[in-house]
């Protein structure tokens, strides 16, 4: 995230992402969309986030793509299907549909994933706040992000507490499932209970004070940001004109 | 300035039948350090919540009586305004983290961001606080990953950052080792010199004796004893109400030679006294 791409202003990255999403949706065919995957792979290589990018892609998007292909080509009934075995058949039309569907998914997912991998949440909330989003909204975003590691450590504490009272939490799949359910109750309840204390903590920091808020963390737009933003607006306008004409 | 007046304050938590604070009348003057002592469940924290305005704003229940801060009714302040007048640090350090900042430096600045302090001023103030609370090594850490004592120090610093006129500290040293405890009391001294009113709930009675000007002793929701530290903490009646007396005082009381204010409160005073007598 400390790379050159990571240091771009969030809005810049968001505009580029949006541009890619729009172009991917409205361009027919699938070649351009599939090119987006290696393109963003190169971008994440430059940003130093290749590992996360590939990891996230193959763990989620790739599985969805495979599933779509399997369903569309072999299972869903189409007019041009040629039977293979039982309910499995091959369909050319299904192949075409899945190509156009998966290519769009690949392109959009690559763009959005790269955006979030190269942008700190802190930067996003800063940019949102700077653009005039109320503090309550940005609080919601950043506290949710902070909540995840906090919840997992809380669940660890609960598991440890239960373990020390003799509940088996390790072992086979069934033992683990059995141990998981009784952990949920305390986890949810204590999280709810914590909100009261959280309110007090925030109130003592003048959370509900009226008036303009400031930020000790700052981000500046550089020349590169402005060039890229202008460029993506021009590209978008050019694209719209080209598609409509 | 910064005067808190409570008149016949009664409070009952929702769904409870007993009054947690009953008929509390007191006037906190500016620039003094008040030690609020008493056994558990004697209403100390509830009282602080009342002074801070969390009762009745966040907790419902029945609140009677009058609370004036700087001559203005507490209900006429809005909550954001009150945060920069009355600072409150809680008993439990684990819940005092805002949960939106990923490092201690920004965590300390969070309150100031909310009231709109300009950035340069914020940086200056945070740097000051980091030095004052010895947080240099923690500034880049995630507030969630700190130990209890570290969190407590960060929480105190973040509260002081708003520069409140009244500072309420609810057992600020409950998680701290002796060295950090001393540090906190040093900060109490610094704040006192800045003319702030400090209300301190604390069970470490020897430190209370050393640093507090006035003592309020609560018992079952009532203010049973109050006055100068010297008067209250040498009175054996404190023990009847479930309070505690400094070790030194207990010693001299048992010895029975000295009475009332003559009894030294701290080790330092005791040593001076004994040396003086020896010289005679």
Image (cartoon, rainbow, N blue to C red):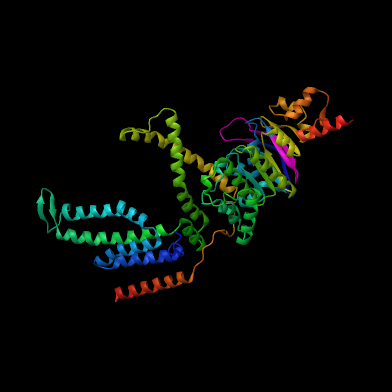
Identity of the residue furthest to the right in this view: B280
Q: Is residue B219 left or right of residue A37?
A: right
Q: Residue at x 79, y 33 (%)?
A: B271
Image-quadrant location for residue A95: bottom left
Residue B1 picture location, percent across and down: 75, 50
Residue B162 picture location, percent across and down: 64, 52
- Quadrant, the N terminus of chain A: bottom left
Q: Is residue B221 left or right of residue A153?
A: right
Query: How many circles with numbers are drawn on the protein?
Result: 0
Q: Is residue B266 visible?
A: no
Vertical relation: A226 (above or below) B119: below
Q: Is residue A203 visible?
A: yes
Vertical relation: B98 (above or below) A155: below
Identity of the residue furthest to the bottom in this view: A245
Image-quadrant location for residue A47: bottom left
Residue A72 or residue B81, whichever sits in front: A72
Image-quadrant location for residue B170: top right
Q: Is residue B33 magenta?
A: yes
Q: Residue at x 74, y 35 (%)?
A: B209
Residue B179 picture location, percent across and down: 65, 40
Residue B197 picture location, percent across and down: 72, 45
Magenta segment: B11-36
Q: Is residue B99 magenta?
A: no
Residue B155 or residue A144, whichever sits in front: B155
């Amino acid at each position: 995230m400390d790379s050159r791409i990571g240091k771009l202003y969030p809005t810049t990255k968001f505009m580029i992402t949006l541009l890619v999403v729009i172009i991917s949706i409205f361009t027919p065919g699938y070649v351009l969309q599939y090119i987006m995957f290696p393109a963003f792979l190169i971008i994440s290589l430059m940003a130093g986030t290749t590992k996360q990018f590939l990891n996230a892609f193959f763990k989620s998007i790739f599985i969805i793509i495979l599933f779509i292909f399997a369903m569309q080509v072999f299972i869903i009934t189409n007019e041009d299907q040629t039977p293979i075995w039982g309910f499995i058949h091959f369909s050319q039309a299904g192949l075409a549909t899945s190509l156009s569907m998966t290519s769009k998914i690949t392109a959009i997912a690559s763009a959005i994933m790269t955006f979030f991998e190269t942008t700190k949440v802190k930067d996003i909330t800063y940019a949102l706040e700077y653009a005039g989003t109320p503090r309550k909204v940005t609080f919601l975003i950043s506290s949710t992000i902070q909540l995840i590691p906090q919840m997992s450590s809380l669940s660890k504490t609960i598991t440890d507490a239960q373990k020390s009272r003799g509940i088996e939490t390790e072992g086979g799949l069934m033992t683990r499932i059995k141990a998981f359910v009784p952990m949920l109750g305390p986890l949810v309840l204590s999280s709810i209970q914590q909100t009261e204390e959280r309110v007090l903590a925030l109130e003592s920091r003048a959370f509900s004070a009226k008036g303009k808020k400031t930020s000790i963390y700052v981000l500046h737009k550089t020349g590169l940001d402005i060039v890229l933003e202008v460029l993506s607006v021009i590209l978008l306008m050019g694209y719209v004109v080209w598609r409509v004409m | 300035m910064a005067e808190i007046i409570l008149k016949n304050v009664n409070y009952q938590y929702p769904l409870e039948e007993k009054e947690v604070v009953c008929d509390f009348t007191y006037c906190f003057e500016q620039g003094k350090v008040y030690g609020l002592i008493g056994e558990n469940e004697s209403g100390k924290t509830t009282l602080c919540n009342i002074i801070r305005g969390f009762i009745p704003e966040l907790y419902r229940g029945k609140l009677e009586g009058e609370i004036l801060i700087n001559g203005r009714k507490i209900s006429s302040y809005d909550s954001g305004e009150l945060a920069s007048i009355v600072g409150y640090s809680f008993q439990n350090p684990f819940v005092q983290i805002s949960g939106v900042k990923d490092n201690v430096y920004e965590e300390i600045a969070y309150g100031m961001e909310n009231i709109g302090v300009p950035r340069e001023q914020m940086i200056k103030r945070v740097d000051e606080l980091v030095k004052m609370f010895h947080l240099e090594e923690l500034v880049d850490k995630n507030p969630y990953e700190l130990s209890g004592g570290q969190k407590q120090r960060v929480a105190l610093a973040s509260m002081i950052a708003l520069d409140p006129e009244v500072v309420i500290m609810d057992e600020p040293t409950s998680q701290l080792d002796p060295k950090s405890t001393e540090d906190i009391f040093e900060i109490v001294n610094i704040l006192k010199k800045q003319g702030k009113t400090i209300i301190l709930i604390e069970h470490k009675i020897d430190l209370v004796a050393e640093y507090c000007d006035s003592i309020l002793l609560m018992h079952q929701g009532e203010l049973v004893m109050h006055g100068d530290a010297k008067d209250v903490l040498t009175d054996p009646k404190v023990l009847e109400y479930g309070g505690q007396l400094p070790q030194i005082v207990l010693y001299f009381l048992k010895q029975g030679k000295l009475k009332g204010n003559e009894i030294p409160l701290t080790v330092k005073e005791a040593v001076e006294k004994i040396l003086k007598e020896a010289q005679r």
